[in-house]
Amino acid sequence: MQSEYDYDAIIIGSGPGGEGAAMGLTKQGARVAVIERYNSVGGGCTHWGTIPSKALRQAVSRIIEFNQNPLYSGSAHLPRASFADILHHADMVIKQQIRMRQGFYERNQCQIITGDASFVDAHTVKVRYPDNSAETFSAAHIVIACGSRPYHPQNVDFNHPRIYDSDSILDLKHDPQHVIIYGAGVIGCEYASIFRGLNVKVDLINTRDRLLAFLDQEMSDALSYHFWENGVVIRHNEEYEQIEGTDQGVEVHFRSGKRMRADCLLYANGRTGNTDSLALESIGLEADSRGLIKVNSMYQTAISHIYAVGDVIGYPSLASAAYDQGRIAAQVIIKGQANVQLIENIPTGIYTIPEISSVGKTEQELTMLKVPYEVGRAQFKHLARAQIVGMNVGSLKILFHRDTRQILGIHCFGERAAEIIHIGQAIMEQKGEGNTLDYFVNTTFNYPTMAEAYRVAALNGLNRLF
């Protein structure tokens, strides 16, 4: 590290990517400062994204579980909650996360600087403080981890009190009876589950021909059916012509000629990187049309001592991956190279109600690649544990090579799917004969458990071979 600079490294942003980089550097003795524009650490993940949306989802799913439990079906005191009520639960979780993450920085003697960062030159960053004063800091290395925000088309008035994005929806004060969600990606589908779970009428507008097209088609179809069965109206292949805020709510005019009215609209169609205020032009870096920065396999930008991690580099745009990217960037800064890299099969966790989680290849990908695969399935309704806890909706699907029995992909739809998937992921990451369907056949699972679905699915798959 070069002592002529104020710091060995400056991190712009305290979300998962910034935290991963900061912790990786400070634990190796580096002098690190983290610049955070918000008044507390955690980034968009903690304040507006992953943590609050999953806390909302958890609260709603418990209400649904209670209301559907036959033990309480005759009760006159079934729980009811407004969106504002469950926001209170989310706020408590956010505060716990902030306290915990603030403690990480304090224990590791990592300085937090509150203000807006912008580049002066390739080693110098200016920080504009909330009181509008400014100060410059220099560092041998800089990590851009400034995250992303909801994409705002210019022809949509997000200042209207009934037009929200996935950040501002957390400030919802009224109780809508009908909500239009424009954008049926992960965020749109998760909020469709939340609002429908609160008995709000939901129209989910999908600009494509099926939900979450990156998923295995059976999982996508299962979610579509579950939405249909629970009253969510999905409108595929629709794009807005105009979104008009009214005194009573919002009216959407579609290119297809349709019109729809609702109490409010949640616009959840894309995100953009928070790079517009960084003055990248002053150091010769460019972001693309969505504010994203290109990096190499070591997360270096076109300027080798400036790195970028997390949402600001695009795919996979996951909090878990961002933290690991930050750790890898820290290793490169300290050692000149990284001895680890992101795993090939990163699991996806989609927190709809019920959850969806996948790892590895889909059936469609394997078919296109002409890989001879077979399928093993387990329906949750056939598992004793699922029957006991009332988790009958869902299934686990294992895709494996017909000849070697190597596991190629695992897809799960149902409650706790994002937890269940990690059992299969651990086996998939084993090398050679450690990654075969036989592991699940020959392993004794606790009974009754949801993990037993792997044994059931493996046996089901083997039966298809003969």
Image (spheres, rainbow, N blue to C red):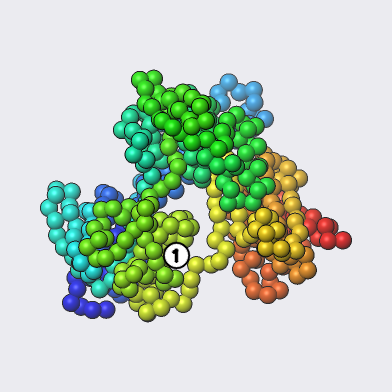
The residue positioned farthest toward the left in the image shown:
133
The image shows residue 431, relative to residue 101, as above or below, that is: below
Among the 4 quarters of the image, the one containing residue 87: top left
Position of residue 215 measured from the top left corner of the image (x, y, whole percent): 60, 51
The one nearer the camera, 267 or 46, is 267
Position of residue 443 measured from the top left corner of the image (x, y, whole percent): 73, 64
The residue positioned farthest toward the right in the image shown:
466
Question: Does residue 415 appear to the left or right of 328 in the view shown?
Answer: right
Question: Does residue 93 appear to the left or right of 36 in the view shown?
Answer: right
* Number of numbered discs on residues: 1
Q: Is residue 416 at all visible to an observer of this figure? A: no
Residue hosting label 1: 324
Query: The C terminus is located in which quarter?
Result: bottom right
Position of residue 184 measured from the top left corner of the image (x, y, whole percent): 52, 40
Among the 4 quarters of the image, the one containing residue 296: bottom left
Taking the spot 43% from the left edge, 25% from the top edge, the residue there is 251
Query: The N terminus is located in which quarter?
Result: bottom left
